[in-house]
Every structure is written in structure tokens, then in C-alpha cells.
Image (cartoon, rainbow, N blue to C red):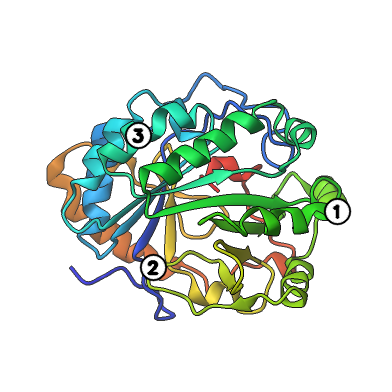
């Protein structure tokens, strides 16, 4: 079948696939009260995930990022990585994690076929890390990052959400952290959701201020590479690491959109800030349904909008980014 494409000429080689909504951290910008079960949770099974990946791969998707919640709370995560990596057409498997017990799990994930990993670290200060996440695990998480570097992952990245009052004064510390490490650090501008208006007003730090700081320190923007995410990458001749900026409110941010999202319950989200999802789960129950699923995906792409409409006050219907895998 033809590759997935929308009305605006954008193609979608990249799928962000959530495998659970559950998270064992309580990050202030995402789940400040921790994950709250409803008693109705029924996340995609391994077989459903495999059918979904096969359908997307048949439509030209070659990069899968497993997300959550926190993916590692699933006991079958290693098997999900293994089966996903074996799907014909899938060239890259990545994972986003909070780093919990990463040092002891990284090798099994690497051996199963995981190639790239993003670790969320919102402060390099132990006390602030605990304040943001609710856990005193910075030392453990950093040990996990080093374990991934030693194993030889093709990409080891750190995700840092910009928070004006919690890490806004530590941008230089992060820049210095990657100077002698072959890491890519992503500064992510805090995003507005349906329920975080007060937090957003208090903690939002515009990404352009960090870009100004990078420029002042001699960092230079790099061209985008095939299949890249939304980050604008910067390099410095004296730094082993790189810095990326994800600025969802920048002009034309959505013009380069190349990714779709499927939630842990099987809902296709055409946009992170969309108004609900499209239920794919009825088409994931049997291998004979893959063709029908592919036709459905192709048809749904005609509904994708040209951009998000946060500037017009449309923040979507999701209470937090954990519900779609970020």
C-alpha cells in the first residue's frame, strides 16, 4: 500500500507507541499526584502491538518509539522490543524511560534489538530531581545512562523539560554536562494541556531563551536528518555532545511533523493536542484484519490538521501527556 500521508504532503515514517499509562514517578508537570488507576485499564497485549506494528510497517513506517507512562513497568517489555524489532521494514526501535532500574535492564533491551534510548532527567541536582519527580533516584538514573553508553546504543539522549522555577537557572549546567559525553540532550518546552493552566503559567520557559543562550555560547544549528523527531539540533566544536530544542510554539513547528501516536488503549492520536483518538483496537484482534487496519489508517490521515491550534486556545481534551505517551 502507499505510504501514510496527509493532505498537506507530510509522510509518517515514525510511530510513537505507548505500551502503558502507568508510571511509577510523580513528575510535577505530568502526574503530580501519581498515576491513578480507574479499574478499567486494559492495555494493548503483545499480540495486538505486533499486529499494529506490522500494519504501520506495511505503510512505510520504519521507526517505532515505545513510550508510556513508564514502559518498563510492563513485565513483557523485553519481548515487545524483540518482536517489534523483527518486523520486516522496521529499521529503528527507540524507547523513552524515566530511567528506573535502567542500569540493570539496559543490556537485555539492547540484546532484544533496542537501538536508541531517551532518559528523562529534569535536573542534575539531587534535591531538585526529587522535588520534580517525587523520587531520590538521580544517582541511579545517571548510572543507567552510563550503562547505555557502554553498551553501544546508537543514540543515548536525555530529555529535559524546561521549568522556569525548577531548572531554568541551570541551563548552563546541562550544556556543560554533555561537553565531554557523547550524549544528545533535548530541552523540551513545557506544553499546555487541558488541566495544567496554572502550572503552565507558573513554570513555562520559552524555548527561544535557551536558543539565545546556546547562540551566545557559540553553538550552531544542524540540518535535520531523515526520520528525526521534532528537535532542532545544535552543535559546538568543543563539545562531544549535542543539544536539541523542542519548541512546540515556534513558527512552522508542525510543518515537519512526521510522527503519529497510538495510546496504550489502542487509540490513534493524529496530533498530541488533538480532541480525542480513533479506536483501532477492534481491528487488532486477528491477523486477517491487518489489511482493513491499513485502509482505516490511510483514511484517518485525511482528518489530520495542518497544525496544532494552541495559539487559538485549543489545548485538546487530554488531562496530561501521559495519556498519549508524550
Q: Earlier in the sequence, mark 3 or mark 1?
A: 3
Q: From the viewer's perspective, is 120 left or right of 106?
A: right
- Residue beneath label 3, please? 107
Q: From the viewer's perspective, is 133 left or right of 74?
A: right
**Separation of disc 2 and disc 1 at Cα?**
33 Å
Across and down, in percent, residue 171 comes to 76, 57
Q: Residue furthest left?
A: 288
Residue, x 74% and y 63% (percent of image)?
313
Q: Image quarter for residue 286?
A: top left
**What secondary structure is found at the residue carrying circle 1?**
helix
Q: Earlier in the sequence, mark 3 or mark 2?
A: 3
Q: Between tags 2 and 1, which lies in front?
A: 2
Quarter the N terminus occupies:
bottom left
**Is the Cβ of the residue at disc 2 closer than 8 Å to that at disc 1?**
no
Across and down, in percent, residue 64 comes to 35, 52
Residue, x 38% and y 55% (percent of image)?
15
Q: Is residue 159 visible?
A: yes
- Residue beneath label 1, please? 201
Amino acid at each position: 500500500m502507499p505510504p501514510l500521508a496527509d493532505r498537506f504532503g507530510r509522510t509518517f515514517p515514525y510511530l510513537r507507541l505507548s505500551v502503558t499509562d502507568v508510571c511509577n514517578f510523580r513528575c510535577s508537570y505530568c502526574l503530580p499526584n501519581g498515576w491513578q488507576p480507574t479499574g478499567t485499564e486494559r492495555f494493548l497485549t503483545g499480540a495486538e502491538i505486533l499486529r499494529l506494528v506490522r500494519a504501520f510497517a506495511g505503510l512505510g513506517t520504519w521507526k517505532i518509539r515505545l513510550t508510556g507512562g513508564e514502559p518498563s513497568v510492563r513485565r513483557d517489555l523485553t519481548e515487545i522490543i524483540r518482536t517489534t524489532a523483527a518486523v520486516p521494514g522496521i529499521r529503528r526501535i527507540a524507547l523513552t524511560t524515566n530511567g528506573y532500574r535502567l542500569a540493570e535492564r539496559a543490556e537485555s533491551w539492547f540484546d532484544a534489538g533496542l537501538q536508541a534510548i531517551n532518559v528523562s532527567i529534569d535536573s542534575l541536582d539531587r534535591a531538585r530531581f526529587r522535588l520534580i519527580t517525587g523520587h531520590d533516584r538521580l544517582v541511579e538514573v545517571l548510572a543507567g545512562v552510563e550503562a547505555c553508553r557502554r553498551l553501544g546504543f546508537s543514540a543515548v539522549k536525555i530529555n529535559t523539560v524546561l521549568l522556569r522555577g525548577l531548572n531554568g537557572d541551570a541551563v548552563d549546567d546541562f550544556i556543560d554536562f554533555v561537553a565531554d559525553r557523547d550524549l544528545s540532550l533535548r530541552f523540551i518546552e513545557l506544553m499546555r494541556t487541558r488541566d495544567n493552566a496554572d502550572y503552565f503559567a507558573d513554570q513555562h520557559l520559552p524555548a527561544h531563551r535557551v536558543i539565545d543562550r546556546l547562540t551566545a555560547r557559540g553553538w550552531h544549528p544542524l540540518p535535520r536528518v531523515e526520520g528525526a523527531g521534532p528537535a532542532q539540533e545544535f552543535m559546538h566544536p568543543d563539545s562531544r555532545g549535542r543539544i536539541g530544542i523542542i519548541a512546540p510554539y515556534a513558527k512552522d513547528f508542525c510543518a515537519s511533523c512526521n510522527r503519529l501516536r497510538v495510546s496504550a488503549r489502542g487509540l490513534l492520536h493524529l496530533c498530541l493536542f488533538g480532541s480525542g483518538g480513533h479506536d483501532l483496537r477492534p481491528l487488532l484482534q486477528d491477523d486477517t484484519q491487518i489489511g482493513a487496519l491499513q485502509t482505516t489508517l490511510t483514511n484517518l490521515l485525511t482528518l489530520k490538521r495542518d497544525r496544532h491550534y494552541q495559539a487559538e486556545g485549543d489545548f485538546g481534551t487530554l488531562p496530561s501527556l501521559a495519556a498519549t505517551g508524550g
